[in-house]
Image (cartoon, coloured by chain):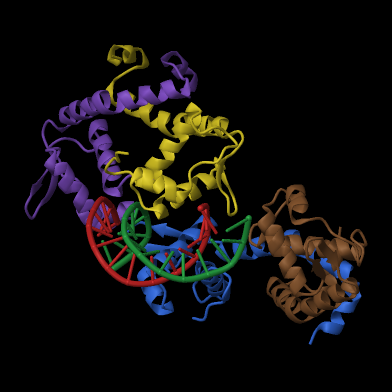
Chain colours: A purple, B yellow, C blue, D brown, E red, F green
Amino acid sequence: MEFNEHKPIYLQISDNICERILSGEWPEEERIPSVRELGSILGVNPNTILRTYEHLTGSTIIYNKRGVGFFVEPGAKKKILSMQRDIFVNDELPLILKKMEMLGITLSDLPKYVK
Amino acid sequence: MEFNEHKPIYLQISDNICERILSGEWPEEERIPSVRELGSILGVNPNTILRTYEHLTGSTIIYNKRGVGFFVEPGAKKKILSMQRDIFVNDELPLILKKMEMLGITLSDLPKYVK
Amino acid sequence: MEFNEHKPIYLQISDNICERILSGEWPEEERIPSVRELGSILGVNPNTILRTYEHLTGSTIIYNKRGVGFFVEPGAKKKILSMQRDIFVNDELPLILKKMEMLGITLSDLPKYVK
Amino acid sequence: MEFNEHKPIYLQISDNICERILSGEWPEEERIPSVRELGSILGVNPNTILRTYEHLTGSTIIYNKRGVGFFVEPGAKKKILSMQRDIFVNDELPLILKKMEMLGITLSDLPKYVK
DNA sequence: GTGGTCTAGACCACC
DNA sequence: GTGGTCTAGACCACA
């Protein structure tokens, strides 16, 4: 997996996992790869994966069965959607719009940039 | 000057300087404050300012006259705008659009969220 | 390590590292010492080593794996050679030839001066 | 006048003056421009020119008549030639040859690079 | 006066 | 453990 320069790797992995859950690749209630497995798949230290899992556990998107592994929470998809929607609309969108104004790009210009 | 938590101070100062150049407060071809001056104005160590200036020099937004000081490059405004536009269109916008798709938000929904 | 008077230490270390890479002492793809390690080996402040590493990263001769360390870029040897050859042929050689002309020394005189 | 990055400006001007003397543009025994004049011609602080003149005075290539100006020493051309020849053969040439060896360039390759 | 280099040491996020 | 940022302060060559 390729990582962006300035965002912590564990958060980038977190985003990646959310996408997998949303897409149904990792269904609710099912076990996800162990810290070691995913670490070796992504070429990343298991500690980093653990941090990701802790982060997602804190948002009740996954949960841990001791000695067994991590599982996707029931309702995870809904949760992810509402959380990310909130963040997007309240935090990110205002910044985006401000920047677009600075750059002289309007909403009606956007379709031009969609590939 | 107030600094944001998680972005390096020297980059925040860099952004700030770009804004000053764009606004015309620091015109092209003119000398900008010395590292010591600006450091004491912003309450920041001169080394940190120097780092900012090195960063901006690397982007040919300012240049150095040895023993004299730093000056705004001719064409700096155009350069800043085109750089920021590039980053926005090529790096940020695709991620934004991807996320919007994931969240089920379309371009035509956006005007709703503008205050 | 002994340092020359008038060239910055961080650049001298940079040259030294390039030699190590060229000689194969530090092979491509392999990890090089941490800033603290190399600093204590060379008797130099870690910040100075970091500066060297940043400089070499900028020339894509080494790269950083976050939280792990710096590594020699694949193709670093070739890159170093071609960079140095470029500088020599395009920047230094013209000056040398100009000076030789001024001094009345011709190319065919040179073998006389080789010990 | 354009200045090289890493060599002090006052030395670059010194080289430039030596060339003028060798070429006969500034003949022996004749007055050369005042510190202020040359400074404004080259776009450089007069202090820098003064430093150049002091440097050349120290090598008895020019001399000062108090209240009148600086003059080219009689015998300056010969002096410059022998000094520069010495430096070139003893100091610079060995370094050049060493670097050429490192880069795999031989003396017989050189004519190729002459424009 | 200017920037440039270097040190010592601290603190931090991240792996 | 890793690098990255920042400070304080020193020293220097140069303009």
Residue at 37 percent across and 63 percent down: it is C69
**In which quarter of the view is residue A88 placed?**
top left
**In which quarter of the view is residue B29 placed?**
top right
Please state which of residues B46 and D71 is positioned toward the viewer in this rendering: D71
**Is residue D98 depicted above or below B69 in this figure?**
below
Q: Visible in this render: residue D11?
A: no
Residue A115 % position (x, y) = 48, 24
Residue C49 % position (x, y) = 43, 67
**Is residue D55 depicted above or below B58 in this figure?**
below
Residue at the front extreme of this rendering? D67
**Is residue C25 depicted above or below D8 in this figure?**
below
**Is residue A12 depicted above or below B107 in this figure?**
below
Residue A114 % position (x, y) = 46, 22
**On-image quarter of the C terminus of chain D:** bottom right
Residue A6 % position (x, y) = 36, 45
Please state which of residues B51 and B71 is positioned toward the viewer in this rendering: B71
Residue at the bottom extreme of this rendering? C115
Disc tally is 0
Q: Visible in this render: residue D49?
A: yes
C82 sits to left or right of A64: right
A61 sits to left or right of B98: left
Please state which of residues D47 and A3 is positioned toward the viewer in this rendering: D47
